[in-house]
């Protein structure tokens, strides 16, 4: 049984949530933020100026990647994330094509999968990964 020791060693809720956001099991908030930022030229998704909330969520995600990187020291998840940010800006400001949108989504999924692999040694999400360690 693999237990996420990085996650359970944190006592601060902000750091715990940041670490939780960077795994594929909890990818829904960052996918919503991606969709929200990709719709900036059109209209807001939830409310006016919702891109500020999505920007904060992206900063929180990047903070979680930094916390994970401090332990596993692999650049692959950060590289995927930088690729994702570049694709996101190219979608919004240069050309809004379908393949850029799919590549943007695929790059954030690859970021989360690679980060979980380097943190836990496995791609799968099970409840045992994030249940408290037994004493």
Image: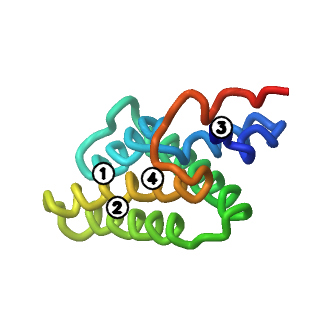
Q: Are marks 1 and 4 in contact (CB under 8 Å)?
A: no
Left or right for 107, reference 59: left
Q: Which one is earlier in the sequence, the residue at label 1 or at label 2?
A: 1
Q: Badge 4, how many Cα within 10 Å: few under 14, some, many 20+?
A: many
Q: Residue at x 47, y 63 (%)?
A: 81
Q: Which one is earlier in the sequence, the residue at label 2 or at label 4?
A: 2
Q: Position of residue 27 (x, y in %)?
A: 45, 40
Q: Are marks 2 and 3 in contact (CB under 8 Å)?
A: no
Q: Badge 2, how many Cα within 10 Å: few under 14, some, many 20+?
A: many
Its colouring scheme is rainbow
Q: Badge 3, how many Cα within 10 Å: few under 14, some, many 20+?
A: some
Q: Nearer the viewer, residue 2 or 79?
A: 2
Label 2: which residue?
Answer: 88
Label 1: which residue?
Answer: 38
Left or right for 40, reference 119: left
- The CA distance from mark 3 to mark 4 is 17 Å
Q: Which one is earlier in the sequence, the residue at label 2 or at label 3?
A: 3
> Looking at the picture, does residue 3 appear above or below residue 61?
above
Q: Position of residue 17 (x, y in %)?
A: 65, 37
Label 4: which residue?
Answer: 113
Label 3: which residue?
Answer: 17
Q: Are marks 2 and 4 in contact (CB under 8 Å)?
A: no
> Looking at the picture, does residue 135 appear above or below residue 106?
above
- Residue 33, image quadrant: top left
- The CA distance from mark 1 to mark 2 is 7 Å
Q: Quadrant of the C terminus?
A: top right
Left or right for 63, reference 85: right
Q: Which one is earlier in the sequence, the residue at label 1 or at label 3?
A: 3
Please name which of the two marks, 2 or 3, marks the residue nearer to the observer: 3
């Amino acid at each position: 049984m693999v237990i996420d020791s990085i996650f359970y060693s944190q006592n601060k809720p902000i750091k715990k949530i940041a670490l939780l956001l960077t795994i594929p099991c909890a990818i829904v908030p960052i996918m919503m933020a991606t969709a929200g930022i990709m719709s900036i030229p059109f209209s807001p998704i939830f409310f006016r100026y919702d891109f500020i909330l999505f920007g904060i969520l992206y900063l929180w995600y990047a903070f979680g990647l930094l916390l994970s990187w401090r332990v596993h020291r692999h650049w692959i998840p950060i590289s995927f994330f930088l690729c994702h940010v570049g694709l996101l800006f190219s979608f919004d400001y240069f050309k809004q094509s379908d393949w850029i949108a799919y590549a943007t989504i695929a790059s954030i999924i690859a970021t989360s999968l690679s980060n979980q692999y380097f943190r836990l040694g496995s791609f799968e999400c099970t409840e045992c990964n994030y249940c408290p360690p037994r004493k």
